[in-house]
Image (cartoon, rainbow, N blue to C red):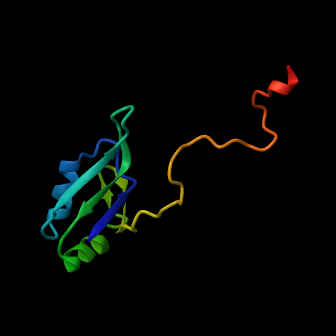
Amino acid sequence: MNIFVAKLNFKTTSEQLLELFEKFGEVSSAKVIMDKATNRSKGYGFVEMPDDNQAFSAINDLNETEVDGSTIVVKKARPKESTGNTGGGYQRREGGGGFNKSRY
């Protein structure tokens, strides 16, 4: 099960997150999400646990507990939703202020 962990202290590391969840069973992965530009924590992360019973136990016991001075939120991660946006291309607006040859 993929578990979402929010409101982490910005100093909490992936290793600390792993240790926290290992108390409840096997952890496949634990990752604090980092900002690519600043290389600082974004204050949330994900933990993957293969056993759903152990994962639910971790969620129930860790949600709204204090870790590194911050009260964390722990819940089952939802699948990433598709926005329907397939990419960044340029889209011309009707009547937009683009270059118009007829004006010059």
Which residue is drawn at the image coordinates 53% and 60% (left, top)? 84
Occupied quadrant, residue 3: bottom left
Which residue is drawn at the image coordinates 80% and 28% (left, top)? 100
| Vertical placement of residue 85 versus 97, above or below | below
Left or right of residue 26: residue 60: right
How many numbered callouts? 0
| Vertical placement of residue 36 versus 74, above or below | above
Which residue is drawn at the image coordinates 40% and 68% (left, top)? 78
Which one is nearer the viewer's eye here, 72 or 97?
97
- Residue 63, image x and y in percent? 34, 67
Occupied quadrant, residue 13: top left
Residue located farthest toward the front when viewing the structure as drawn: 102
Left or right of residue 99: residue 61: left
Report the quarter where the C terminus lies. Answer: top right
Report the quarter where the N terminus lies. Answer: bottom left
Left or right of residue 25: residue 10: right
- Residue 9, image x and y in percent? 34, 47
- Residue 43, image x and y in percent? 38, 48
Residue located farthest toward the top when viewing the structure as drawn: 104
Which residue is drawn at the image coordinates 16% and 56% (left, top)? 19
Which one is nearer the viewer's eye here, 6 or 95?
95
| Vertical placement of residue 34 versus 56, above or below | above
Residue located farthest toward the right when viewing the structure as drawn: 103
Residue located farthest toward the left when viewing the structure as drawn: 26
